Amino acid sequence: MIVLGVILLIIGLVTGIGILWTIGIILAVIGIVLWILGAMDHAVFGRRHFW
């Protein structure tokens, strides 16, 4: 999810499409939050791992 967010950020920046930029930021932030919670060994939404 982090990688997809970064890719969308780059595409949005290069093409100037604002919605891709916004979606990229949202996906990157959600991915980072899930990564941090997983690193703390905290179950999120009833799942221990997100693949």
Image: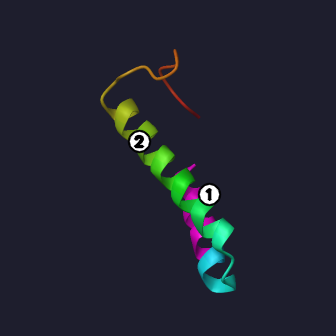
Label drawn at residue 29: none
Query: In the rendering, at what x and y percent does residue 6 appear?
Result: 55, 64
Q: Establish if 12 lies above or below 4.
A: below
Three-letter amino acid code of the residue under disc 2: Val
Tell me the residue at 69%/77% (across/down): 17
Q: Is residue 40 left or right of residue 47?
A: left
Q: Establish if 5 lies above or below 33.
A: below
Tell me the residue at 45%/37% (across/down): 34
Tell me the residue at 55%/31% (across/down): 50
Mark 2 lies on a secondary structure that is helix
Q: Is residue 19 left or right of residue 43?
A: right
Question: How many other residues sit within 10 Å of disc 1, few (<14), some (14-19) or many (≥20)?
Answer: some
Single out the residue that lies furthest toward the left: 40
Mark 1 lies on a secondary structure that is helix
Please tell me whether residue 30 belongs to the stretch shown in magenta.
no
Query: In the rendering, at what x and y percent does residue 8 appear?
Result: 63, 66
Please report the bounds of the magenta region as a residue range.
Answer: 1-10
The residue that label 1 is drawn on is 4
Nearer mark to the viewer, of 1 and 2: 2
Label drawn at residue 33: 2
